[in-house]
Image: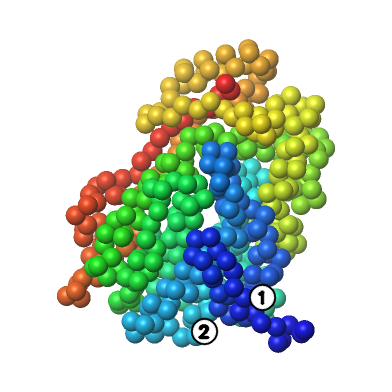
Amino acid sequence: MSSEIRNKRKIINDPIYGFVTIPNDLVYDLINHPYFQRLRRIKQLGMTNLVYPGALHTRFHHAIGAMWLMVEAVKVLQSKGVEITEEEECAVIVAILLHDIGHGPFSHALEHTIVSGVSHEDVSEMLMEKLNTIFKGKLSLAIDVFNNKYKKKFLHQLVSSQLDMDRLDYLKRDSFFTGVSEGVISSDRIIKMLHVQNGRLVIEEKGIYSIEKFIIARRLMYWQVYLHKTVLSAENMLVKVLQRAKEMANKGIELFCSPALHKFLYNTYGKKDFSRHPELIEIFAQLDDYDIFSAIKVWSSHEDKILSLLCRSLINRSLYKIEIRKTEFKKSEIEKKKRETAKRLGLKGNEVDYFVFSKSVSNEIYNVDKIGITILFKDGKTKDISKSSDQLNVEVLNKTVKKWFLCYPR
């Protein structure tokens, strides 16, 4: 059967929302493109499954879920008289579908080690531009919406803001797969309360309690899942593995790698290099979780003591012990732990830095200085959620919570 007459309105059975229908032919074709299919091979929550064993869902799951929420959100807004043309509807759905397409495997670990100064947002935009060429300009409006360059600003807010379809899906999905019930939110209720006033996205007054729950759920999920201390330990061990591999690669020591991983491990590319060498984005699009973990499995028996020990520890879940507190660790505490570890493991010079180190993490609940979540009252007046809620204190809302942690071997 030719592609022109194939039924592309397929149904996907999603564990969160039930049956999800692919809304149009372009979305179907994008989902089936190798760039998007790669997301099946990248876990949504990286190393989090070492704490919550069920957290094995992928960025593919999340992208499909966010797309479906966008379909529902557009329907709600159109039913309330908000003008969204068929072209705009397609664009905003494509923008949310592709919003994470640039994520590499274990994104944040990769961004701080193998790829220098190139964020997943940068890569997403590059891949969207490539797809736009492949699909003969059909993604141009979606890219404008994604980059907030389109006149109807509420469309970008649906894709990226302090209340967007990305956040609504990942909170609900991550809560489901981790089993952390504190993250459960009423995405249906929130979407039903969406409206647009003066070109901006607003929430009708009846939805205020659902928004309060959303903000609190996000805060709890950050400390209980995304910034869980054992997750931090595992992610930082992965960072140290990649740093050691990069250090050895820089010295010309040959390590087992897939061709795609070899390209980025043995060369240092910045954002300008991706612009000058279009083939780099194609090679990056071949990287997934399997490249990283296949290498780690082989490296676990490498003759380099530090690399092999770190890799074995990660594979066998023998993670760093981690202490976390609200105040910075004293230099003397860190140095003492380094001396003890260096002596115990027989480490020389700066080698101990792979095993003992201190860093900080931050959790921003809600930023009142950014375009916030606006509540629309029955009299037509609007207020930011921070000034409308009787449950959420604005000073607490706007406070960035910072904590410090110290990692060292058990």
Judging by the rendered image, the residue that carries numbered circle 2 is: 87
Q: What amino acid is found at the position of numbered circle 1 in the picture?
A: Asp
Image quadrant holding the N terminus, namely bottom right
Q: Name the N-terminal-most of marks 1 and 2.
A: 1
Q: Quadrant of residue 8?
A: bottom right
Query: Measured along the vertical axis of the image, is residue 239 above or below residue 59?
Result: above
Query: Measured along the vertical axis of the image, is residue 389 above or below residue 19?
Result: above
Most foreground residue, 84 or 244: 84
Q: Position of residue 13 (x, y in %)?
A: 57, 66
Kindly identify the residue that appears in the image at 53 percent across and 60 percent down: 15
Image side of residue 185 versus residue 317, left or right: left
Callout 1 environment at 10 Å: few (<14), some (14 to 19), or many (20+)? few
Q: What amino acid is found at the position of numbered circle 2 in the picture?
A: Glu
Image side of residue 317 versus residue 293, left or right: left
Q: Is residue 272 visible?
A: no
Query: Measured along the vertical axis of the image, is residue 140 above or below residue 33?
Result: below
Select label 1 or label 2 by which is in front. 1
Image side of residue 103 versus residue 224, left or right: right
* Element on which disc 1 rests: helix
Image side of residue 12 versus residue 306, left or right: left
Q: Position of residue 410 (x, y in %)?
A: 57, 21
Kindly identify the residue that appears in the image at 76 percent across and 27 percent down: 304
- What label sits on residue 29 in the rendered view? 1
Callout 2 environment at 10 Å: few (<14), some (14 to 19), or many (20+)? few
* Element on which disc 2 rests: helix
Figure label count: 2
Kindly identify the residue that appears in the image at 78 percent across and 30 percent down: 301
Q: Position of residue 295 (x, y in %)?
A: 75, 41
